[in-house]
């Protein structure tokens, strides 16, 4: 994922900078729920938390917003994650278990929230949010509930 992640980051640089004017006009997003359900007290705004068990994991996290929050959990083996935040009020919660899962998540704008959970083997997910007030929840693989 290294070459793909760096190429992806390079192509995003222009898009993230171009939306700065749109971010200034973004609305306040009360009651944001997607992505927040799994956040814990150690994932307060402005914090990046990475929890790992197993082997072979990789992650590239770019957080340009001091209020953005990233919580990443990787359990099992050989997971790869790319997370990019730019804007205001984003919340990311990515949980990968099993083996060989990949996730690319890009948030741009204000009030975005993402929750992504992958279980099993070989899951791939790409989430791209731009603008304001966006929410997304992606779950793949067998339910652990």
Image: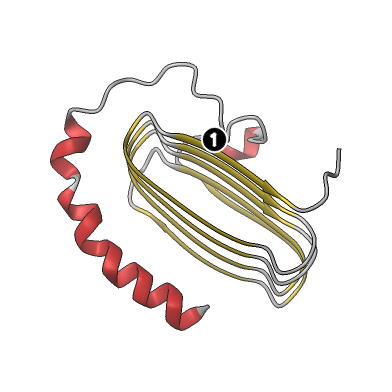
> Farthest bottom residue?
3
Residue closest to the eye, 47 or 102: 102
Residue highlighted by disc 1 = 44
Q: Residues within 10 Å of mark 1 (few under 14, many from 20)?
A: some
Can you give x and y, in whole percent of width and height, for residue 113 in the image? 48, 36
Q: Is residue 113 left or right of residue 25?
A: right
Residue closest to the eye, 143 or 18: 143
Quick one: SS at disc 1?
loop
User: How many numbered callouts?
Assistant: 1
Residue closest to the eye, 66 or 97: 97
Q: Is the image coloured rainbow, by chain, by secondary structure, or in one colour?
A: secondary structure
From the viewer's perspective, is residue 69 above or below residue 60? Answer: above
Q: Is residue 60 left or right of residue 84?
A: right
Residue found 44% across the figure and 77% down from its top: 4
Residue found 65% across the figure and 30% down from its top: 37
Can you give x and y, in whole percent of width and height, for residue 28 in the image? 32, 20
Residue found 63% across the figure and 35% down from its top: 39
From the viewer's perspective, is residue 95 above or below residue 99? Answer: above
Q: Quadrant of residue 36?
A: top right
Q: Quadrant of the C terminus?
A: top right
Can you give x and y, in whole percent of width and height, for residue 95 in the image? 68, 51
Q: Is residue 87 left or right of residue 80?
A: left
Can you give x and y, in whole percent of width and height, for residue 93 in the image? 59, 44
From the viewer's perspective, is residue 112 above or below residue 1? Answer: above
Q: Quadrant of residue 81?
A: bottom right
> Farthest right residue?
145
Residue found 80% across the figure and 61% down from its top: 120
């Amino acid at each position: 994922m290294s070459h793909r992640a760096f190429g992806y980051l390079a192509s995003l640089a222009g898009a993230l900078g171009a939306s700065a004017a749109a971010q200034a006009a973004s609305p306040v997003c009360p009651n944001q729920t997607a992505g927040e359900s799994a956040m814990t007290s150690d994932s307060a705004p402005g914090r990046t938390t990475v929890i790992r068990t197993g082997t072979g994991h990789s992650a590239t996290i770019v957080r340009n917003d001091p209020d953005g929050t990233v919580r990443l959990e990787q359990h099992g083996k050989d997971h790869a994650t790319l997370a990019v935040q730019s804007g205001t009020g984003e919340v990311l919660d990515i949980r990968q278990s099993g083996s060989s899962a990949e996730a690319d998540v890009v948030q741009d704008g204000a009030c975005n929230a993402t929750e992504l959970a992958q279980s099993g083997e070989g899951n791939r997910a790409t989430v791209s949010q731009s603008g304001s007030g966006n929410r997304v929840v992606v779950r793949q693989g067998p339910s652990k509930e």
